[in-house]
Amino acid sequence: MQKIRVQIGSDVPNKSRVVYVFSFIGLHSGVKFELTEENGDILYGKRKDTSKEAKVIIPCDYSLLEGNSSPETRTIEDIPVLHKDIVPGDKLLEKHESSIRFTYDPVAIIFYLISRIEEVKSTETDTHGRFISTNSVLHPSGFLNEPVVDYHLNTVKRALKDMSFELDDRKTPMAILTHDVDQPIRSIKGSFRLLFEGEKDLKSRVNSLTDTIGRKIKTEDNPFWNFGSFTTAEAGYGFKSAFFFTAPYYRTKYDPKYNVNGYNFRMKIAELTAKGFEVGLHGSYNSVIDGDKLTKEKEKLENTGVNVYGNRSHYLRFEVAGGYRKIQSANLKYDSSLGYSDTIGYRCGTGLPFYPYDFGTEKAIPILEIPLIVMDGALIPNREIEEVNEILDNLVDTALRLNGAVTFLWHLRTAYDIDYPGWFDVYKRLLKKLSENGFDVLKPSSLAESYMNLAGELGYHDFIFE
């Protein structure tokens, strides 16, 4: 294991935030960063007069690290650079005889994006209390669909390699396949309602109604009960996905109406877990906002006989400031709620997993966040299938180039071709592309376990957690 000493200048306003970012870099480069008072291999901030020159020198953008105001952006070497106090040069790095100097602060950029400090300080939300994608600092620059953090992470890794440090970084991109079980049953009553209120053309609505009635008469599977369609397609490539079931403690008008403890659901959950698929909690509309509902919902889902390790909040309704403490109180190991409902993209500037930052304690919380990047409902509507496939190809190719990660969400109902023509074909094409490009497709619980083990091996437990 490579050990690299980091010296944080006395001028740096919040050393805990710097330590947090170096732990993120360390976990994704396979190195152990150790703090030192002087003569570090890496110098972050201003050098003490008694210190020798470091091999890698990074200036501190104080205002950006503190998140005092919305940063400015400029493009250098085709990637966006966030800055406030420091005006970066025309190059990201300056190579000298015995050192590399950054012209900007990648540490503050990474912190700004993965800590979600812009959400903590934001007062503007949509009607469901969610952070608005257009308020992201990455939106005006057009880089919401780019893993900006990954670019800067790889720039730091490149500098370390150029200075002859050995990294044990991952060489394979990752994909996480997930399904929110929101509407697994299409009722005849609902089909009649959509006949008069639906947005699709009349022929499609009539076909949906007659097909739903026909299946009911023949006692065939409901048109939205498409667990097998997804598991069969994924198993064909050796992939396993996660299905997030909802179990509301108090059901609002926004929450799914099924009972997870009903016979059909209990049998399906047992079948999924027996086949090696994962069952997670789809926390209800208010679960991460109000009281201890999440704990009770986890217990309700576990009464079906399954162990539950992770959460994704319904409507992607998540409160960064307090939500992770509720997840921790529920004894969950990971969350995958940080995505946008209205668009695809990197809400956290990355698809890579990370431990969330708690601004109350200025420490990391030992709950792995697995950011959601692509949701079918935000990707496909109002686009031609060819355009959708091109967008997915670009995301996969970028992850392949940067050894990144992409989490996908496809809902069960979208395998019903009458209502969602072509959506399941898009998903099957995606699976094929992931397989052909050698992606490591992981269940989120496996990812959470491996990263916690890695954090222990590299000595980051005491370094960043409470």
Image (cartoon, helix red, strand yellow):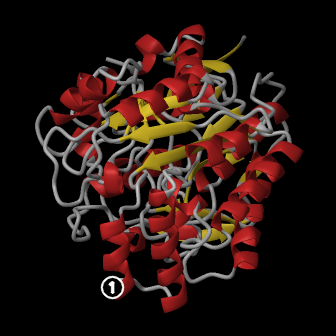
Task: Report the number of numbered marks.
Answer: 1
Q: Is residue 233 above or below residue 30?
A: below
Residue 346: quarter of image: bottom right
Q: In which quarter of the image is residue 115?
A: top left
User: Please, what secondary structure does the residue beneath circle 1 have?
Assistant: helix
According to the picture, the residue beneath numbered tag 1 turns out to be 197
Eyeballing the image, is 39 above or below 73? above
Nearer-the-camera pick, 277 or 329: 277
Q: Is residue 62 left or right of residue 125?
A: right
**Residue at image location 63% in from the left, 73% down from the top:** 421
| Rendered image quadrant of residue 330 | top left
**Horizontal side, residue 168 vs residue 31: left or right:** right
Quick one: label 1, few (<14), some, or many (20+) residues within 10 Å? few
Quarter of the rendering occupied by the N terminus:
top right
**Residue in the picture at 58% in, 27% down:** 447
Instruction: Return the x and y of residue 108 as percentages of the image width and height.
Output: 48, 47
Query: What residue is drawn where x is 48% and y is 54%?
Result: 222
Residue 282: percent from left, percent from top: 36, 42
Location of the C terminus (image quadrant): top left
The residue at 59%/73% (across/down) is 418
Residue 111 drawn at (x, y percent): 46, 44
**Front-lying residue, 284 or 96:** 284
Measuring from the top left, give residue 406's x and y in whole percent. 63, 48
Asked if one can make out residue 398 in the rendered structure from this viewpoint, the answer is no
Q: Say if residue 108 shows up in the picture.
A: yes
Report the residue that reaches farthest toward the front.
Answer: 217
Question: Residue most toward the right?
Answer: 436
Amino acid type of the residue tagged 1 in the rendering: Glu
Q: Would you say 236 lies left or right of 198 here?
A: right
Q: From the viewer's perspective, tell me whether residue 81 is left or right of residue 94.
A: left
